[in-house]
Image (cartoon, grey):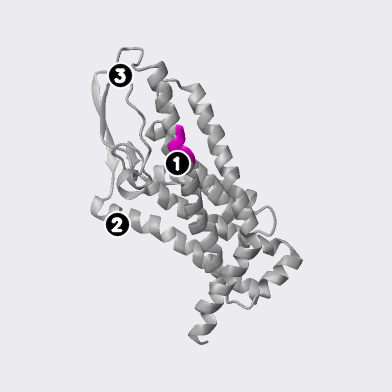
Amino acid sequence: MTKGQYFSFSRFHQLVTLHWGSQKRLYLLALPAIAGLLVVWGIFLLFMDNYNPLDDGMQAFTYYWGLALVGCLYSSTIFAGFGSKAHGIAWLGLPASALEKLLCGLLFSTIVVFIGFAVVFYLVDIPLVKIGNELIERQHRVWPGGYPVAPDVVWNLFHGLPGKNPDSDFHVLLVLYFILQAMFALGSVYFERYAFIKTIIAFLVFALVFLVLEKQVFAHILPYGWKPFTLTNDWITNGETLRVKEVRVSTWITGPLAVLLLLGIPPVFWIATYFRIKEKQV
């Protein structure tokens, strides 16, 4: 098979144009809807907290949860055409390769949604933070204990979660966003109906099985008194000092493995989605 049969830029451009032409109303109508929900949530926070309603932590919480919800909803519908026989035949009949269809879906469900949500978030967040600071200035300049109330600042997406934590250095939550996007995209092409709900159920079942294996299998393999991934800890009981043993692989190994695991999961899901689309075409 020649290279042009896998990917052609002109064919991919036409596919993107076709998708945008048929779905642009949905994307454009979603923007004010998302903005409205963010405004309602921000006003709720302003009423609930008179001192520090929109600190950077709450802004980050709103952004990441909103991004995950919106992104997963879009990803779970990006290949939903397979759920309808008429739409599925029409979608499969498009003169484009499975790779081009996959890239087109990922472009809109992952990149476009990410950029669109970030733009809408800051268009809403910046005025709300300003309003919150004005309310603080008018109502409460100090905390009840007499400490001054510092003005809220607009949270910077590129700084990660506030404070010193793994997310502020490695943007773990953004990586998790791409993992969720890839997982729900696979679910949209794998499940013909109710893909969003079925993908959530599949994820919960996987998480439950993992927890059972960790607690009921791996924990019993270790010697008595040893616990996996537990910091060494001392405490005194009945006059004796007890110490919890620590089972921990060197950070020289766990660090690269953790990075490889986080960055490697989305491509695995994308590859599985590609072969699922190719199988549908065949």
Check disc 3 and report the residue beneath it.
148
Callout 1 amino acid: Lys
Tag 3 near tag 1, CB within 8 Å:
no
Residue shown at 50% from the left, 48% from the top: 117
Please tell me whether the stretch drawn in magenta is mainly helix, strand or loop: helix
The C terminus - image quarter:
bottom right
Question: Magenta segment, which residues?
Answer: 124-128
Disc 2 marks a residue whose amino acid type is: Pro
The residue wearing badge 1 is 215
Measured as percent of width and height from the top left, residue 9 is found at: 50, 77
Residue drawn at point x = 50 percent, y = 67 percent: 271
For label 2, the SS is: helix
Looking at marks 3 and 1 on the same chain, the residue that comes earlier in the sequence is marked by: 3
> Looking at the picture, does residue 63 appear above or below residue 261?
above
Numbered disc 3: secondary structure:
loop
| Residue 7: percent from left, percent from top | 51, 78
Q: Earlier in the sequence, mark 2 or mark 3?
A: 3
Query: Which three-letter amino acid code belongs to the residue tagged 3?
Result: Pro
Question: Which is nearer the eye, 210 or 261?
Answer: 261
Real-space Cα separation, disc 2 to disc 3, in angstroms: 43 Å
**How dense is the environment of label 1, judged by Cα within 10 Å: few (below 14), some, or many (20 and up)?**
few
**Residue 126 forms part of the magenta stretch:** yes
Q: Residue furthest right?
A: 86
**Residue 13, located in which quarter of the rendered image?**
bottom right
- Whichever of labels 2 and 1 marks the residue nearer the N terminus, that label is 1
Question: Pointer 2: what residue?
Answer: 256
CA distance for labels 2 and 1: 25 Å
